[in-house]
């Protein structure tokens, strides 16, 4: 046998052994779910606690909302999770909302005494066909704009003039025209040379507050440092929600992309002059240098910089966390997934998990 042939055989045998070893290592008692990276902190809490009656557990993959949709359609995930509103264009068969179906009466009648309540409901309804989809909005996630103005003088401008950096909120709970104009100037640039500066932002705010004495003079003292915009990746639920809340703004090439809220926040902490948008989970953890843009709706103001619980309650700038399940009544994991979702909504610890993640729980039950 030639040396070359011997090496080829060694490689082939090694590959076969490696594949065999890998196959044995893949857990057979796990059920795959996944999707939005924003939903992951919440799902981590629930999947760490939950096991099915036959000791199977759920494994969550943070692959993004787009992958959550694609993989639930392709039967890769038993449940797909998205952090944006359902777009009808994504579905040939529109998901049926259980918020107006199974949970239509406010859900107070459902308790976790019977953990199969939801699956039994689906089982009894013979009109529900395989290949269709059910959706459950689990929570509202607050959408927070945060910025690091260390060394820019922008904080002193606000203090000296009494001007508040805030976005107005419309009756539809989207950002108003003035806020959109600010965000367009910050985000819609393809060339870093065209990025807005902190001085330009200060001068803009001063022009909108002419009654504030010396506001333009104070704005001139602010640094010409560029405002560096951070955004989540294209196709993510966070990015889609940003566009929906801002009248369709699409970040330009000058914006820096990150694959999760945690990555955006972690980078922003160490990057003076930057701005980004994150979930309340991160937006509530502010520092001396990292601050939140206040939001105002009518006579109400939510200022997270004051670190008061009331500033989180009823926060109007939100996007949904939604679970989507593909019906397959012949698949045992489909029924297990239904029980898991119901448990997320009705278990005694569920409310605390949502609150710890900075979320407003959508489905109210006796236990919450």
Image (cartoon, rainbow, N blue to C red):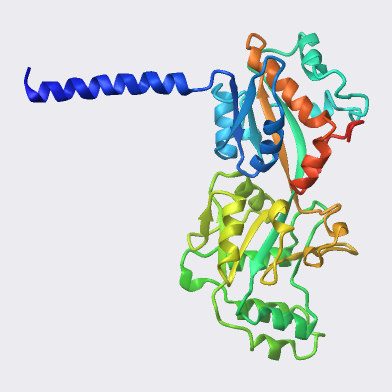
Quadrant containing the N terminus is top left
223 or 269, nearer to the observer: 269
Q: In the rendering, at what x and y percent does residue 125 appear?
A: 79, 11
Quarter of the rendering containing residue 124: top right
Instruction: Check the image and name the residue furthest to the left.
Output: 2
For the residue pair 153 and 85, the one nearer the viewer reads as 153
Estimate the x, y position of residue 142 in percent, counting from the top left: 75, 51
In the rendered structure, the answer to whether residue 155 lies left or right of residue 361 reads: left
The answer, for residue 359, to whether it is visible in the render is no
Who's the residue at 91% across and 28% down the image?
105
Residue situated in front as seen by the camera: 243 or 157: 157
Which residue sits at x=75%, y=21%?
339
Asked if 350 appears above or below 147 in the picture, the reply is above
Image position, residue 63 (x, y; %):
55, 38
Q: Quadrant of the C terminus?
A: top right
Q: Residue at x 70, y 88 (%)?
A: 218
Residue 180, visible in the rendered structure: yes
Q: Is residue 64 above or below residue 312?
A: above
**Total number of numbered discs in the rendering:** 0
In this rendering, the answer to whether 41 lies above or below 255 is above
Image position of 348 (left or right of 258): right
Q: Position of residue 292 (x, y in %)?
A: 72, 65
| Residue sitting nearer the eye, 143 or 206 | 143
Q: Is residue 342 left or right of residue 221?
A: right
At 68% across and 28% down in the image, what residue appears? 324
């Amino acid at each position: 046998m030639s040396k070359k042939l011997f090496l080829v055989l060694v490689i082939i045998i090694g590959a076969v052994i490696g594949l065999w070893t890998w196959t044995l290592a893949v857990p057979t008692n796990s059920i795959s779910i996944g999707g939005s990276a924003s939903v992951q902190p919440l799902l981590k809490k629930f999947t760490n606690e939950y096991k099915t009656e036959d000791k199977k557990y759920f494994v969550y993959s943070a692959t993004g909302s787009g992958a959550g949709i694609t993989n639930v359609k392709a039967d890769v995930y038993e449940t797909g999770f998205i952090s944006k509103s359902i777009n009808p264009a994504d579905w040939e068969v529109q998901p049926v909302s259980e918020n107006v179906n199974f949970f239509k009466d406010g859900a107070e009648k459902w308790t976790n005494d019977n953990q199969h309540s939801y699956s039994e409901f689906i089982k009894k309804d013979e009109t529900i066909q395989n290949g269709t989809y059910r959706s459950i909005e689990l929570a509202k996630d607050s959408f927070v704009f945060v910025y690091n103005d260390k060394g820019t003088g922008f904080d002193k401008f606000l203090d000296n003039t009494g001007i508040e950096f805030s976005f107005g909120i419309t009756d539809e709970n989207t950002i108003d025209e003035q806020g959109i104009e600010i965000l367009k100037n910050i985000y819609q640039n393809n060339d870093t040379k065209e990025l807005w500066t902190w001085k330009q932002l200060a001068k803009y705010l001063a022009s909108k507050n002419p009654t504030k004495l010396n506001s333009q003079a104070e704005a001139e003292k602010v640094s010409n440092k560029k405002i560096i915009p951070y955004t989540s990746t294209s196709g993510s639920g966070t990015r889609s929600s940003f566009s929906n809340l801002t009248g369709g703004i699409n970040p330009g090439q000058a914006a820096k992309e990150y694959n999760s809220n945690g990555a955006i926040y972690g980078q922003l902490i160490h990057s003076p002059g930057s701005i980004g948008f994150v979930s309340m989970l991160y937006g509530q953890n502010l520092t001396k240098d990292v601050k939140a843009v206040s939001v105002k709706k009518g006579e109400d103001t939510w200022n997270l910089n004051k670190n008061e619980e009331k500033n989180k309650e009823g926060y109007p700038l939100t996007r949904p966390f939604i679970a989507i399940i593909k019906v397959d009544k012949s698949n045992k994991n489909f029924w297990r997934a239904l029980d898991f979702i119901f448990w997320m909504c009705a278990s005694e610890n569920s409310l605390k998990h949502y609150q710890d993640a900075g979320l407003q729980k959508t489905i109210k039950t006796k236990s919450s």
